[in-house]
Amino acid sequence: MHQINKLVYYFAILLIILSINFFLPRVMPGDPLSYLSDPGADMPARMTEEKRELLLEYYGLDKPISEQYISYMVGIIHGDLGWSIYYGAPVLEVILGRLKWTLLLVGTSTAIHVPLGILLGATSAWARGKKKDTGLLISILSISSFPSFFLGILLVIFFGIKLDLFPINGAQTAFATYSSPFGKIFDILHHLVLPATTLVISHIGGTYLLMRNSMLGVLGEDYIMTARAKGLSEQYILHRHALMNALLPIVTMTAMTVGFLIMGTIFVETVFAYPGIGNLLYNAVLYRDYPLLQGIFLFITIAIVGANFIADTIYVRLDPRVKNE
Amino acid sequence: MIEGRKILGSVGLGILAVFVIVAVLAPYIAPYNPHQMSRPMEHPSSRHLLGTNDIGNDILSEIIYGTRVSLFIAFVVSAISMLVGTSLGLIAGYFDKLGFVIMRVVDIFLTIPRLPLIIVIAASMRPSIWNLIAIFLIFGWTMTARIIRSEVLTLRSRYYIDATKMIGGSDCYILWRHILPNVIPLVVVQFIMEAIHVIFTEAGLSFLGLGDPVARSWGMVLHYAFECPIIYVSDVWMWWMLPPGLCIVLTVLGLTFVGYALEETLNPKLKSPAYGRGL
């Protein structure tokens, strides 16, 4: 019953997101085309009459609103997200072309971020009140005060330009020919280092704090005291009793973290001109390519909500106590 | 480690005080009008302490006026969000049926990712301070409403509330006199959280070029610097990117420290034995 409710809830959310996406360009002052055709607006990309027609046809503004809504929904089901003005191609095609780089970036960052956050959080909680804990806490709070794009810029300047250790833009060297497949892999990883580092550092605070709090809570439980009274070694208590239980909230958190990382790529990919979806969003904003912008909005939003749904479902299976609530 | 928290809190307050003074006194402190043009791309000198940007505006003056924009948006959004969030939280916690409806709305708002929606809306509006404030307000109240509600739920089952009801205290009187004062500390912490969130998001939106191009915030200064093709070639970044970026970092750090210091006085859990020795 609980699961079905959840399914209905997430379906409603999906419907709301799709509706927002539908109504947004229609309720904004003027119609979606007025900004593009306004000669006073500072538009980098001028629109030809032909593209205007394409756009008009996509929005179908001359038809009644209910008919527009139905044809929009049918279009979405068929994967029709409209036509990108700037790239002159179907929006979905443009997005899918960039997807692999974002997946690589988010995947790598998550794989480093989660274990690192858990390790630091657990270390901090285990040493609560000591210098190690205070130092870690203050350092991580301070690092978290850096906006990710500013952190990225600093890494570009120090490691990319001053020390010249890593490339500062793109996902691979342009027009490069590789002598072996390893050369290509190395090149891609080499380009991945700075963006992934930026993403990990700027989001580590959340996981760290959650793990620290969760662990502090567990350490106050009676069964930890019982374990101590039984004379178990500190190492054994840490690994078998404290860590395992403190990890539970992290499962949910990981899915949320993936969501945050996806949003983080908007800034990080912009700074590093990394050819993923985040960078695409920046270009869509820059050129006021509304169909593309909305397509990306839909894509990112559904990905994040989907991740949360999965986390919700897994959590109930991991922690039976939740079901009874 | 209670002392440690106090020191951090004072440091945070000190940082914030400096920025607030700069924001209020901007016209008296700034050496130039931020829109006044002189020679572009000048290096720092006695005439322009942080040089000039690509269209010849004095960067120091731009940053000083930017303090106004960034802090103003954060303050207005957080203040209104707290007002709305607290009111709805009080109502939702005290009246069950209304509460159910309000909380379903909050659930939906909290499930839809904020940032992508904010970017899409900001891109479809003409960029201005007031539009940005309006956009941030859409989401600003939600978390506060939820937190205040759950606090009210525990508060309203206390004996003194029952006693007040018995001697004929009205719902309004109870909410105003007995419940509101007890949630104020939580509201203060939420205010700081929201301010941090708004400063970050505003800086991010502006960095993407969605900020007010006339009243430039710190993020907007960074946007123009980032868009300048020769920014990494020489040392220009040192006076054009580093100062506005550090302003954002310091403000957020100040707010974080203050919030952290307050948390201890407000969260009794931290005083329990398990946490007792913790910071």
Image (cartoon, coloured by chain):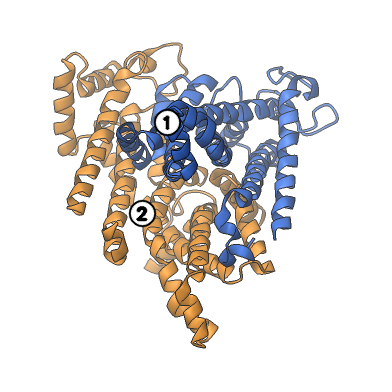
Chain colours: A orange, B blue
Q: Is residue A250 above or below residue B103?
A: below
- Which x, y percent locates residue A162? 67, 53
Give A316 or B47, whichever is nearer the viewer. A316
Q: Residue at x 32, y 17 (%)?
A: A33
In screen coordinates, is B107 left or right of B251? left
According to the image, label 2 marks what residue?
A: A103
Circle 1: element type = helix
Tell me residue B60's x, y (percent). 74, 29
Q: Which amino acid is tagged 2?
A: Leu
Residue A178 visible in image: no
Chain for disc number 2 = A
How many numbered marks, from 0 up? 2
Residue A158 higher or lower than B45, as above or below: below
Res. B165 image quadrant: top left
Q: Dividing the image into 4 quarters, which one contains the C terminus of chain B? A: bottom right
Q: Are marks 2 and 1 in contact (CB under 8 Å)?
A: no
Q: CA distance from mark 2 to mark 1?
A: 39 Å
The location of residue B89, given as percent across then percent down, is: 43, 35
Question: Can residue B89 be seen at all in this image of the molecule?
Answer: yes
Give the residue drawn at x 42%, y 36%: B142
Q: In this rendering, do the residues under marks 2 and 1 share a single chain?
A: no
Q: Nearer the viewer, mark 2 or mark 1?
A: 1
> Residue placed at 53% from the left, 28% from the top?
B77
The image shows residue B30 at horizontal and vertical percentages of 77, 24
> Mark 1 belongs to which subunit?
B
Can you tell which mark lies on residue B68?
none
Q: How many C-alpha atoms fall within 10 Å of the one at disc 1: few (<14), some, or many (≥20)?
A: many
Please name the residue shown 56% across and 48% down the image. Answer: A152
User: What kind of element bears circle 2?
Assistant: helix
The residue wearing badge 1 is B88
Q: Amino acid at mark 1?
A: Leu
